[in-house]
Structure formats: structure tokens, C-alpha cells
Amino acid sequence: MESNFRILCPIDFSECSLNALEFATRLGELYKARLILYHVLNKSDYLKLSPDDPEGVHQKIFVTEKLQNLLEAVNEEALKNGLASAEIQMDEGQIVDTIEAFTKREKVDLIVMGTEGVNGKLSKTMGSRTSRLVGDSKVDVLVIPRTAYFKKFKLLAYAQDYLEEDKLAIQKVVEIASFSQSRVEVVHFEKAINLRTESLHLTMQEELRAFCKSDLVEFRLQAAGSDLKSGIEDYLEENKIDMLFTLSDEQGILDRLLDRSLSKKLANSIHTPLWVIKSF
């Protein structure tokens, strides 16, 4: 990682966003990064609740105080453990568009956002916007389900689909894994494994090994069955995968397997934190 690696964590003070902040902070410690706690003010919603404060003065005071309290907690815990710096920022506007504009302006490298996760509807405040951001963002997005909790990474997985971009993506995952000495499993999912799929996997494995010369990397061909979405979820749970990485690509593995738009629906499909790679 670059020494000035920047992590943006949007905060709306929900349980989801505070859980994402925990992940963002711990990653910031690992990568010695600059962490930005970011809140988007929505004046139109606020005016419905407080019509006597048209300028949103009390809203800004209230939000600033809450952000400052979070910042103090982050600084006290994380600066001594490697976090380079932390700061708070606020803007006014529509959440996704405002986050994207800030990300471009401040040269953010990674956005860490929370979501409700599977078995429940996406939260109106965070989840649906997280899934849209996954699709629209130009930088990597790490999606943190509300049910996930941070622990030392032992096993990361990269879901490949035999794309040329897999080579660069695997190199990036290996670099990320090196900070915690995590193992990396490069996995390809098929409905069923047969001689054809095994032969193709061995061929691609040999080609990919040249791009990830690391003892930490293993390759796997995984049978997912007829319900590929459930197959992926079972794999993640049974193998205790700490984080899943995938390309954001219309032809990518998860878009193909889930048979729906990654940019709109992926964020609520799994319990495991999901790192969507957007750039190399």
C-alpha cells in the first residue's frame, strides 16, 4: 500500500456504519493509512423534522459533536497501533453522489461502508446506498455486513472467473494479505466439476501462478451445485473465509453466479465482508 493510503468511512450513526468504522479503523492500523470519518448532511430531511431551523445550524452542531466523539475514540485506540491519522469531514447533498464527489476530490483509495446483510431488507439509510455505491464507485469498496465482526485475517478468498483482469486483481489481494500474513485462496465456482472443468482449471492455474509468486496463495475449484448463490455462501461459511474479494465487472464471477446486477444487489447477499476491486 502507498504510504498516503486514504480510507473513507461514511457515517450515519447507525449500527451498520459504526460496525464499518471498526473495520475501517483496524484496516487503517494495518496499512498505516489516513482515515476519514465522513457524514453527508441531508437538509431536506432535516427540515421536515425541524422547520424552525432552515439553515440547519442545530443539525450541524449535533452532527459535529457526535463525529468529534467518534474521532476521539478512534484516535485514542488506533493512533498508537499504526493509524497514520484520522479526521472528520461533512458535506451536504445526496449521499451517493456526494460521497463519489468527495472520493474523487480527496483521492480516496478505499470506501468502507456497512449494510444490513442477508436475511433482511437493506436499511433505507445505508444498505441500498451501499449497493448503489458498489456499482458506481471508481475506487474499491469494502462492504461490511452488520453481522460481521473484525478479527485477525487468516484466510482471504478471491473469486475468479478466468478473466484477464484476474491476474492484476490477484496481485492486489496478495499485497493486501501480506500485511496480516493471511493465506489467499483463489477459487473458481462451477455448478459441477467434471473432466472439462478440471482441465480448464489446471490450465488457468498454471497461467495465474506466474502472476502471484507467493507461498500464501492456493487455488481451488469449487462445486457450488445448481443454486450457485447458496453454494458460495456455504463455501464462505464452511471454510471460515474472513473476507471475499471480487472484481466489479458485468462479466465477473458474482454477477454471473447470482444472475443479477452486482452494482445493485450484491451488498445484501452474504454475511462475509466483501471487497469489490475497482482499480489496480
Image (tube, rainbow, N blue to C red):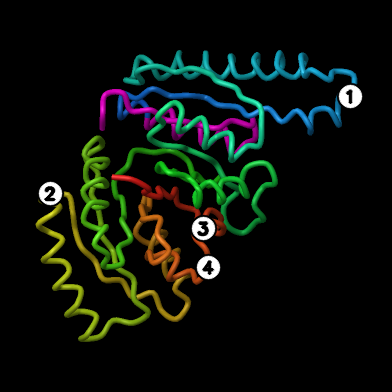
Q: Which residues are magenta?
A: 1-27
User: Which-is-in-front pick, marks 1 and 3?
Assistant: 1
Residue 144 image label = none
Q: Residue at left 55%, top 26%?
A: 38
Q: Distance from label 4 to label 3 (Cα)?
A: 8 Å
Question: Which residue occupies 28% across, 81% down?
Answer: 193
The residue beneath circle 2 is: 214
| Amino acid found under the numbered disc labelled 3 | Leu
Badge 4: how crowded within 10 Å, few (<14), some, or many (20+)?
Answer: few
Amino acid identity at mark 1: Pro
Question: x%, y% of residue 67?
Answer: 60, 19
Relative to residue 124, is residue 49 depicted above or below? above
Asked which secondary structure carries label 1, the reply is loop
Classed neighbour count for the residue bearing mark 1: other residues with Cα under 10 Å, few (<14), some (14–19), many (≥20): few
Q: Earlier in the sequence, mark 4 or mark 3?
A: 4
Residue pointed to by mark 4: 260
Q: CA distance from mark 4 to mark 2?
A: 34 Å
Q: Is 151 in front, or is 129?
A: 129
Of callouts 1 and 4, the N-terminal one: 1
Label 2 element class: loop
The quadrant of the picture occupied by the C terminus is top left
Q: CA distance from mark 1 to mark 3?
A: 37 Å
Mark 1 or mark 3: whose residue is earlier in sequence: 1
Q: Is residue 20 magenta?
A: yes
Amino acid type assigned to the residue bearing label 4 in the image? Arg
Residue at point 79%, 17% (across, down) = 55
Q: Residue furthest bottom?
A: 195
Do the CB atoms of the residues marked 3 and 2 lie less than 8 Å apart? no
